[in-house]
Every structure is written in C-alpha cells, then in structure tokens.
Amino acid sequence: MLVDRERLSAYAAPHLPGDGDITVERLAAGHSNLTFVVRRDGREWILRRPPEGPLLPTAHDVIREYRVMDLLARSGCGVRVPVVTVACEDPGVIGAPFYLMERVPGDVIREKLPEWAGEAERRAIGFELVDALVELHSAPVEPFVEAGIGRPSGYLARQLRRWRGQREGAKTRELPDYDVLSEWLETNLPMDAGSSLVHGDYKLDNVVLSGPRVAAILDWEMATVGDPLADLGYLMSFWIEPGEVDEFAEVAGNVTKEPGFPTRAEMVARYAERSGRDVTDLTAYVVLAIWKLAILLEGSYSRHLAGTTDDPFFALLDRGVPALLARARAVAGA
C-alpha cells in the first residue's frame, strides 16, 4: 500500500482544516514522485511521496522539495508556488517521507491542449513560462545557501560530477552516446553564467495554468542554487517546433509544435530582455539538459527491469533513453 489512509489521517488531521474523514486518491500524472489527492470537507491537497525503490542517490527527495517551496513562500519574493501544509520525514507513517500542499486549480498540459488554448493563448503560455522563470531567477539565494540547498558557485562542474555518479548507480546496459556526451560536456561546458535559484526540471508540464497564466510551478525536487541558464536550456530542450522530428514524444512532449506557440528564438529573446542576462550560446546548456534527463530516466528504466514500478511508461525507456542521447549528440554536433 503506497499510502495507508488511516495512518495518514492520524498524522495529518491536526494540520488540515475541517473535521470530516480524509480520503486519498492516486493521480496517474507524472513519472517521478508519486502524487495523490487528499480530500477533507470539500477541500483538496496534493500528497507527494517517492516511488518504491531502489532509487538513485539524492533522487526523489520530497522533503527537499517541501523545504524549497516553504523557503520561497517565506521569502515573499513572488515566485509562484503552491502553499505547503506539512512534511513528514518519518517513513513509519505511510512507508516513505511525504508532504502535503494545497491543490492549485487549473490545467497541466502534457499530451493534449485544453479547449480554451487557441493560437493567441498558446503564444501567451510560452511567454508566461519565460516570465515566471525570470521571477524564479530573481529570488534571493541567501536563504537557500544558508539552508544547505546549493552553493553559490561551481554549479556546472558539480552537475557533471553528480550525474556521472547517478549513471554509475543505475548502470544496466552500455550506452555509447552517453560516453561521447560525457566527454563533450567535459570540454564544452562554460563557466557558470551567474548564480540564482534554479528549478532543475522547468518545463510546460511542471506548471499549473489558469487560462494562459502560470498559476504555480510544481516539482521542485531538483531545485538548488546554480546557473540560471541551465533552466533556460532545459526548457528549450523540450520546446519542439513545427516540422521537427520528435524522436520520443512520451519524454519530450510535442504540443509546442502546434500553431501559435512562440519559437525557441522568441522565448530566448524574451528571457534576455526580461532578465538582462547574456544568452548568446545555449548549446551546452541544452545538451546538458537532455543528457541529465536521459540519465534520470535510465534510473527509472532500471527500476522497471527490477520490477519495482508499475508505471507502463518506463517500459518505453528501452528505446527512449537511447533516443534522447542521440538527440543530445545531434544538438552537440558530436
């Protein structure tokens, strides 16, 4: 049982308004941490817990995710985050650490556009994603450094070391493109372009939309202090344009190919204008983003092979991870 309702009720009831029974329903959305809707007296919260193991080291850290959102809310900096309610580090309650946050109403776009999203709204969504990212990168970093969530320098070098280690921790097969890209990044990663809070997984299906406006940014488990252009490169790595071949739509998504969405060049130009940052060459950041995602998903594929996940998506990673690495190699020209 992924969430024991009675144990959860005993722990969470004092922290939630109302006095009725607590109900729990699993959501099918997403392929990372497990997500549930908790209901009581007409109100809804989201519960997040890690999947069942084995897990990559430092991956699926829901308590870190809670701390980041809590610090952002306390800072009053205006970054769009859900209101967190309570966190539990004791795995004895439901079998794993977890936290609760208020559910933000709206749409999360994955494979299908909502009916209200015409061409004008699609264009607005693209620029809203950029504007919300600029806000995120304007948040004060000191509270996060003091809390041990990242360091103010050396981010890109640490990322290379960390994700190489993650790959070794989930090595179930040879991936020749991974090795080529690892060497390419060693040579081509620039010095950090600055320091800010970075989300680490910033893309269209990790925000809640209220109409075309970004109402809340979700999935903060990989957030840290680092180079803001890493987030921009990650967002662009998912931004497929009309006429482009999407080797693995289950991973990268493809709704941005629809008419109306701004181009990558327009998105990057808006980020430069709103942030004042130099975005001349994002290639290494885009390659790093795809390479990291491939390593993360290879860990999920490893769990699939071990039989510790019931997500049918992970079976597709047999070809999905090599497709991502091939795409990263094409972007790099390696």
Image (cartoon, helix red, strand yellow):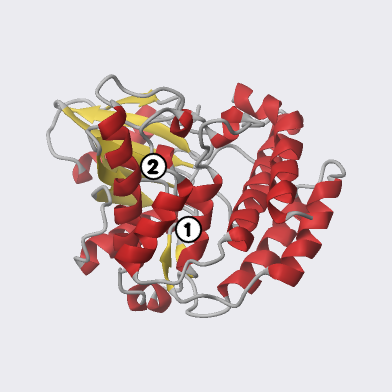
Q: Secondary structure at mark 2?
A: loop
Is residue 300 toward the left or the right of residue 22 in the image? right
Give the quarter of the image for residue 7. Answer: top left
Q: From this view, report whether residue 160 is shown above or below residue 126.
A: below
Q: Nearer the viewer, mark 1 or mark 2?
A: 2
Is residue 124 toward the left or the right of residue 239 in the image? left
Q: Secondary structure at mark 1?
A: helix
Q: CA distance from mark 1 to mark 2?
A: 18 Å
Mark number, residue 231? 1
Give the quarter of the image for residue 68. Answer: bottom left
Task: Residue at 51%, 30% (x, y): give it.
Answer: 254
Q: Amino acid at mark 2?
A: Pro
Question: N-terminal of the two: label 1 or label 2?
Answer: 1
Task: Residue at 38%, 64% (x, y): give it.
Answer: 272
> Is the C terminus in the top left, top right, bottom left or bottom right quadrant?
bottom right
Q: Position of residue 268 (x, y in %)?
A: 43, 56
Between residue 109 and residue 239, name the one nearer to us: 239
Q: Position of residue 67 (x, y in %)?
A: 36, 60
Q: Amino acid at mark 1?
A: Asp
Crowding around mark 2 (Cα neighbors within 10 Å: few <14, some 14 to 19, many 20+) is many
Q: From this view, report whether residue 242 is shown above or below residue 139.
A: above
Between residue 85 and residue 3, name the one nearer to us: 85
Mark number, residue 64? none
Between residue 116 and residue 61, name the one nearer to us: 116
Task: Residue at 47%, 48% (x, y): give it.
Answer: 264
Mark number, residue 262? 2
Give the quarter of the image for residue 17. Answer: top left
Task: Residue at 33%, 64% (x, y): give it.
Answer: 273
Q: Position of residue 308 (x, y in %)?
A: 67, 31
Crowding around mark 1 (Cα neighbors within 10 Å: few <14, some 14 to 19, many 20+) is many
